[in-house]
Image: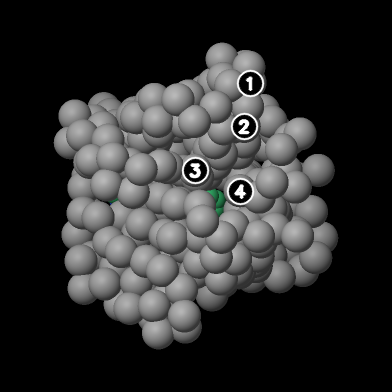
């Protein structure tokens, strides 16, 4: 089960955190993984080298998902080179926190440019390839705060809620082509994105997690592998929550 041999998967923002864990897990199942990065070329190369050292197949591709034109042409190019693109993991994302009354317009714009428009540009380019193949898997990354809200994260939460609405719509648009579109909604996961929090903040947060701990990137990668697999062919338009029970 969950074999991905012969498939090509693109993971945006794959050089660290959840993206890295997804790239590694997809490669373990046999997929050829394209690790996208925007700034961390050395880190992305290290991920790809590690995958290859473990007997997998990987390469890197630098593009900024916020640049929708560059993103679309990079995806078109890599799909042409491989002759296919089976899985897109639209993982690249940023967080900018702030209470509504202090929210800067430019921060909201940036969050939507990367988290929403960036993810949609990837999906648009990927569906063009997948439509011809009449199969494909698109996996978006939302967040528990996009579903339940969080004081101090209004704009980030809005961007992550937008991803869910978009994914459900794309799922409906492409179901007739056997392209499935789903969302992983992580809870509080230990990565660089959350490393800025103080221990006191983390302790407070963990109190509202029934499983009593933060999650790992590897635990998100498990859901990613499942959604990418043939076994998930009948799952589309869904939000898979990996949040320790924080939101049920
Ligand atoms: P991270 O900051 O460790 O990794 C994000 C990656 O995205 C980085 O590699 C970064 O370089 C890349 N990226 C950012 N902007 C980009 C751009 N314009 N173009 C290409 N790549 C870009 O964060 P993470 O914790 O691994 O988060 C991954 C995804 O999961 C994000 O979408 C995030 O919103 C979501 N998420 C994370 C958590 C968590 O607790 N860590 C919770 C819920 C959702």
Q: Are marks 2 and 4 in contact (CB under 8 Å)?
A: no
- CA neighbours of label 1 inside 10 A, class few (<14), some (14 to 19), many (20+): some
**Disc 3 beta carbon < 8 A from ligand 1?**
no
Residue 180 is labelled as 2
Q: Position of residue 63 (x, y in %)?
A: 21, 47
Instruction: Point out the frontmost of discs 3 and 2.
Output: 3
Q: What residue is at 54 percent from the left and 36 percent from the top?
A: 136
Query: Could you tell which of marks 4 and 1 lies nearer the N-terminus?
Result: 1
Q: CA distance from mark 3 to mark 4?
A: 8 Å
Q: CA distance from mark 2 to mark 1?
A: 6 Å
Residue highlighted by disc 4: 228
Residue highlighted by disc 3: 86
Query: Could you tell which of marks 3 and 1 lies nearer the N-terminus?
Result: 3
Evaluate whether residue 7 shows in this view: yes
**Disc 1 beta carbon < 8 A from ligand 1?**
no
Question: On the rendering, which quadrant does ligand 1 occupy?
Answer: bottom left
Q: Would residue 244 be found to the left or right of residue 78 on screen?
A: right
Q: CA distance from mark 4 to mark 1?
A: 15 Å
Q: CA distance from mark 3 to mark 2?
A: 11 Å
Q: Secondary structure at mark 2?
A: strand
Q: Are marks 3 and 4 in contact (CB under 8 Å)?
A: yes
Residue 175 is labelled as 1
Query: Could you tell which of marks 2 and 4 lies nearer the N-terminus?
Result: 2
Q: Secondary structure at mark 1?
A: helix
Residue 100 image-quadrant placement:
top left
Q: Position of residue 178 (x, y in %)?
A: 63, 27
- CA neighbours of label 4 inside 10 A, class few (<14), some (14 to 19), many (20+): many
Q: Secondary structure at mark 3?
A: loop
Residue 40 image-quadrant placement:
bottom left
**Observer-nearest of 204 and 122:** 122
Q: Are marks 3 and 1 in contact (CB under 8 Å)?
A: no
- Quadrant of the drawing holding the C terminus: top right
């Amino acid at each position: 089960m969950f074999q991905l041999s012969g498939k090509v998967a693109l993971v945006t923002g794959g050089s660290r955190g959840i993206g890295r864990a997804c790239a590694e897990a997809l490669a373990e199942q046999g997929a050829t993984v394209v690790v996208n990065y925007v700034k961390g070329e050395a880190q992305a190369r290290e991920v790809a080298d590690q995958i290859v050292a473990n007997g997998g197949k990987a390469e890197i591709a630098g593009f900024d998902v916020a640049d929708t034109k560059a993103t679309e042409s990079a995806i078109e190019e890599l799909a042409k080179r491989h002759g296919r693109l089976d899985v897109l993991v639209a993982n690249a994302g940023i967080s900018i926190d702030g209470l509504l009354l202090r929210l800067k317009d430019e921060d909201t714009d940036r969050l939507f440019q990367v988290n929403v428009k960036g993810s949609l540009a990837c999906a648009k380019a990927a569906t063009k390839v997948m439509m011809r193949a009449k199969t494909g898997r698109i996996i978006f990354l939302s967040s528990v705060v996009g579903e339940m809200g969080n004081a101090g994260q209004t704009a980030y939460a809005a961007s992550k809620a937008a991803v869910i609405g978009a994914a459900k719509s794309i799922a409906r648009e492409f179901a007739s082509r056997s392209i499935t579109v789903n969302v992983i909604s992580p809870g509080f996961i230990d990565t660089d994105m959350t490393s800025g929090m103080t221990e006191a903040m983390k302790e407070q947060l963990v109190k509202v997690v029934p499983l009593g701990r933060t999650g790992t990137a590897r635990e998100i990668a498990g859901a990613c592998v499942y959604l990418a697999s043939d076994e998930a062919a009948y799952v589309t338009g869904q939000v898979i929550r990996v949040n320790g029970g924080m939101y049920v």
